[in-house]
Amino acid sequence: MKRFVWRLQKVLDIKSKEEQVKQMELFRLTEALAERQSEILLRQQTLREIMGEITRDRSAQRLGTQEFFLRHATTNDRLIENLKRQITDLEIQRRKKTEEVLAAKRFREGLEKLRAEAKERFIQEQEKLEQKEVDDRTTVAYARSVSMKS
């Protein structure tokens, strides 16, 4: 039996690789997003701990420490706001990349369905050809046996 060859196999291979690349990019974006979120949580937790220590401090140095903290808190606030902007940008990029991955997946699945249908037609055609060949052999064998009897 002939081997099945599908003309669009290279396109399917390329689209499969493209989908894998997009999935890896999506994974990287998701990791970056998680890193930024954990960095924000860590900074916020650190600020809360420092504020807790300042409020528990009953010494005369409390006012100086509190003033120093408030002076430098704006820097942390800016860093946190910058991280929040980065998170927003990463979420937008992740949504777009998710749409790209889904589109690539649908395209690949469509090609795989076409390939399966083409292979099924090929197998049916090969089976018909084999059956025809068997029928032809049977007819020739019968014709020979009839001609030999006469």
Image (cartoon, helix red, strand yellow):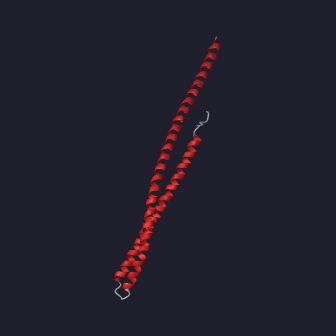
x then y, percent, for residue 120: 52, 34
Residue displayed at 62% across by 14% down:
146
Residue furthest bottom in the image: 60
In this rendering, would 65 be left or right of 122?
left
The quarter of the rendered structure image containing the C terminus is top right
The x and y percentages for residue 147 are: 64, 13
Q: In this view, does 147 lie above or below 40?
A: above
Q: Is residue 25 above or below residue 83?
A: above
Residue, far right:
148
Front-most of residues 21 and 148: 21
Q: In this view, does 87 lie above or below 109?
A: below
What is the tally of numbered marks visible in this picture?
Answer: 0
Residue 85 coordinates in the image, percent (x, y): 44, 63
Q: Nearer the viewer, residue 101 or 112?
A: 101
Q: In this view, does 117 lie above or below 15?
A: above
- In what quadrant of the picture does the N terminus appear? top right
Q: In the figure, is residue 47 to the left or right of 97?
A: left
Tell me which residue sits at (57%, 39%) in the image. 8
Q: Nearer the viewer, residue 38 or 1?
A: 38
Q: Which residue is drawn at 43% across and 77% down?
A: 72
Give percent across and percent down for residue 92: 44, 56
Q: Which residue is drawn at 37% across and 78% down?
A: 51
Res 54 → quadrant: bottom left
